[in-house]
Image (tube, rainbow, N blue to C red):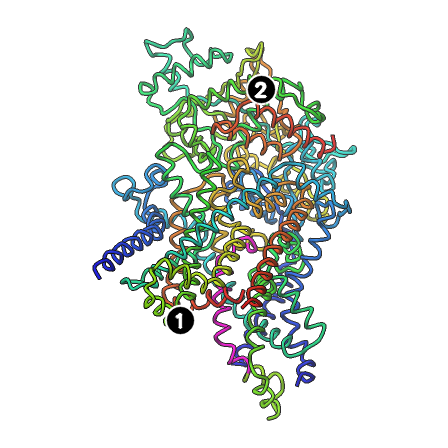
Amino acid sequence: MKKKNISTYILLLLMLIFAAFVLFPILVVLINSFKGRLFISSEPFSIPKGDAFVGMTNYTEGLAKTGFFSAFGYSLWITVASVAIILLLTSMLAWYITRVKGIVTQIIYYALVFSMIVPFQMVMFTMSKIANMLSLDNPVGIIILYVGFGAGMASFMFSGFIKGIPLALEEAAMIDGAGPVTTFFQVVLPMLKSTAVTIAILNTMWIWNDYLMPYLTIGTNYRTIPVAIQYLRGGYGAVDMGAMMAMLVLAMVPVIIFYLVCQKHIIKGVLAGAVKG
Amino acid sequence: MKKTLSIILIIALALSSAFAGGASESNANEVYFLNFKPEIADVYTDIVAPAFEEETGLSLRVVTAASNQYQTTLRSEMAKSNPPVIFQVNGPVGVQAFTNDVAPLEDTGFYALLADKSMAIEQNGHVVGIPYAVEGYGIIYNDAIMRKYFALPDKAVDISSADEIRNFATLKAVVEDMTKHLDELGIKGVFASTSMASGTDWRWQTHLFNMPLWKEFGDILTTTEASTFEFTYNENYKALWDLYLDNSTTAKGMVSAKTDADSMAEFALGQCAMVQNGNWGAAQILGQAGNVVASEDIKFLPLYMGFEGEESQGLCVGTENYLSINIHASDEAKKNADTFLTWLFSSETGKKIVKENLMFITPFNSFTEEELPEDPLAKEVNRWMNMDGVTSVPWAFQGIPSEQWKQDFGGALLQYINGSMDWNAVVEIARNSWSVEAEIAGR
Amino acid sequence: MEKSIKKYFALFALPALICFLISFVIPFIWGFVLSFCEFTTITDVTFVGFKNYVRAFTVDNYFTHAFFFTLAFAIVSVITINIIAFALALALTRSIPGTNAFRTIFFMPNLIGGIVLGWIWQVIINGVLAYFEKTIAVDAAYGFWGLVVLMNWQNVGYMMVIYIAAIQNIPTDMLEAADIDGANYWTKLRKIIIPAVMPSITICLFLTTTNGFKLYDQNLALTAGNPNHQTEMLALNIFNTFYSRIGFEGVGQAKAVIFTILVAMIALLQLYTTRRKEIEN
């Protein structure tokens, strides 16, 4: 019994050390967000006091330089709208290609699966050209791009689930006189809820954090949070590290809040995503 | 459930088609200018654009490319449905890259202003690029610190003012002795940081490099046609380069985090005595919060690196600022672009802004002697250009075959600083990359 | 029933398919075609055969270097991430206090985006190196290990969650039986736990490998390839070929095709191993 106690304490200590390793970088950024930019590079790990402490200056400057609030607005709009439309359109598509058997639906299915493994670099150049040609290079048009690029994984997961639903339920509804539209929205869609939550979470994480697609398609005029942060470099050659720290904090806060609120769903979601993907 | 979803869907599709319809309409009364110079981006948006709109009713849209990203930004903007009307090319090589995009400019009012027509870039008998600013660069020094040094009782050199530094040997002796007296001079290093952060190494891979390049090829045209490059004068380059690095405010290991803006700030704050840069840097020095350098103490020295007879060598004076008009723009947009440029460089308001805010030394006949900028560095460039027995060095770097060459060389310089590459390898990269890039450029 | 659904193609399948065509199918085919062409604007395209593929390797050696750098990075990060994640999972499935809190904390970095992560770690690493008057751009080794640490920080929690779920699925009676037989912890680990979680190990190995190969945002924000392309990974190299080198768009597209084949091969290998496992069981 005594041996077990010692090993428990050792394990606990190791876990605490690892927790410190995880939390330390976030803490450093938080501390530095209150420091003058020159002190961030000269003494990054000290507590800001005296000359080094600049209060909220970094935040006000960063907000002005990055247009953080509009970036937050664009990120939020693009993420929420894209996820909602992905869920709706791909669940419909998945149901259709699962229930209608034929060469066409087979081809669509394999094309969707194939798109999951293709890296973005393969299509980024031509996709941004097409987006420009079709005037999709705005915060609404980009949703169509996200739906198209997210369609692979979402339809794959939906159709995996739909395959497991017994046909009898749908047939019963149809015999009762319901058309396919009613059947889908009243019988099938409610059953997809848990898969939909998983897909919503995976897609939210992807779209919220995505950098390249918004940078290439809408980056010149509309900046999402990752694009706005990366623009703190570049712009005039120099990086204002003070503003950078403040913006990193602001970028992390909503994510951490979201995580703490929906933790259970998120962990379940990524777990399901990993196993099926 | 069904209703809500379908409503969301309909709204989204309706919205996207509305955007799709609206976004492609370009405003014909808007002049889209893709600006090359980040350091004066604010002047264009805050001063030039409102004044232009007030006087002509046309509007000006200025987009500024990120530091060192002009070529790629221009390339991607040109491919868009609403491309820039006015853009900048950096010389004959720049025109080659956009050879199908430049409009003939002979009949423009803007071309009529150009005093020396031979300065324009021609292509197939048409004028396609017009210079708008002549610039000079060298080593900027703070004469107040130099006077302090020359007043030291134990200085190791015979001369008694910075004016007397007329060759590399003297420069080296002065700089190295100054490094021994840092505390007495109240500076952190003689030279400002050798900025090597990505995108900010142009002062070395382009400007400083101009010296051995010019010495090897003699003029811009020969450089532009050279298919191979020997780097014959690499030891001279290395001599001045090492002097910068060994007598700097910043340890070698830290230069990869420094930008040119940092270097200019160090100079303005009196932390160093010298910084290599051009007259465009005046605004950065005088506009720096906490600037301690008096306007009359800001002076220029040529880039001495031990060439024979360098006593007669002046500053590097030239231009890589040529404006071109997009041939694909509508006739009205082209006309408006000409209206804007002519307005900027000949109207009273425009000229005032050019002199006081943009601080260009212009090549236009619309400017009188009194209308040249009054910033100390522009005056210094004029002083050196008109000095007896001194010849300015042309901007041979315009003949560098590609931007890639500059990146390759800059990358090699950084590895040299970090000790992961020896000097011979740097020279080798400069040579090889030149052959490769010259071939790609079709030389 | 199938027939009645079939008529509704335009309603059910078409909206998503149009999006899919616009943002994937057409760009993919067009991109593949362009990899055999030389072009600076999309209206001025000439067919050049395999010239771009040759140029991808001959004009400079950055692409080859990026391949080996990416490979080394993937190997090191896959091993470290999975060992650490598995160890944490073992620890957190034993009865120590606060397992839920630890799990919450360890998983958190996974949600933070790559650009943000890259900048966070740049501050930390440059902060440490500043004591030696250096920065992350001084030596490619700093960038390499910086990326490894970053990747561990981001991914360990995720893989740990997968391992925890697998370990918790092991029937308790199997472990109890082993306890009765007097087996010690290492024997149990080797004989029962590891074989039981093998499918999860496969999943995690492939997930981390693919993540490692496709890494872009973190690479851009942490090192941007400095010094001199020495820490440039494949995705970043492709981006730089496209957008910072005029006239090299075709070469960039050719590199992207090679990259796609590489990633697809990893995915097929995964499919093959998981299928074989399923048959064996």
The residue under label 1 is which amino acid type?
Pro
Q: Decide which of C52, B71 is in the foreground and name it.
A: C52
The residue carrying pointer 1 sits among few (fewer than 14), some (14 to 19) or many (20 or more) residues within 10 Å by Cα, namely few
Give the quadrant of the N terminus of chain C: bottom right
Based on the displayed image, in which of its 4 quarters is residue B338 positioned?
Answer: top right
Residue C273: give x, y in percent of width and height.
Answer: 57, 60
On the image, which quarter does residue A45 sit in? top left
Pointer 2 local density, CA inside 10 Å: few below 14, some 14–19, many at least 20: some
Please give the residue where the numbered disc 2 appears in the rendered image: B234
Q: Using the numbered discs, state the Cα–Cα distance from disc 2 to disc 1 in whole angstroms.
A: 73 Å
Q: A111 or B64, which lies in front?
A: A111
Most foreground residue, A174 or C8 = A174
Residue C95 is left or right of residue B101, and the answer is: left
Callout 2 amino acid: Asn
Percent across and percent down for residue A207 are 51, 60
- Which residue has dot 1 on it? C171
Q: Can residue A231 be seen in this view?
A: no
Q: What stretch is highlighted in magenta?
A: A188-214
Q: Residue furthest top?
A: B158
Q: Is residue A197 magenta?
A: yes
Mark 1 falls on what kind of element? loop
Chain ID of residue with mark 2: B
Is B72 part of what is drawn in magenta?
A: no
- Quarter-wise, where is residue B308 in the image? top right
Residue at 39 percent of width and 24 percent of height: B272
Q: Does any portion of residue C214 appear in the rendered image?
A: yes
Q: Do labels 2 and 1 share a chain?
A: no
User: Which residue is most to the front?
Assistant: C181
Q: In this view, does A125 lie to the left or right of B151?
A: right
Viewer-proximal residue, B147 or B402?
B402
Which secondary structure, mark 2?
helix
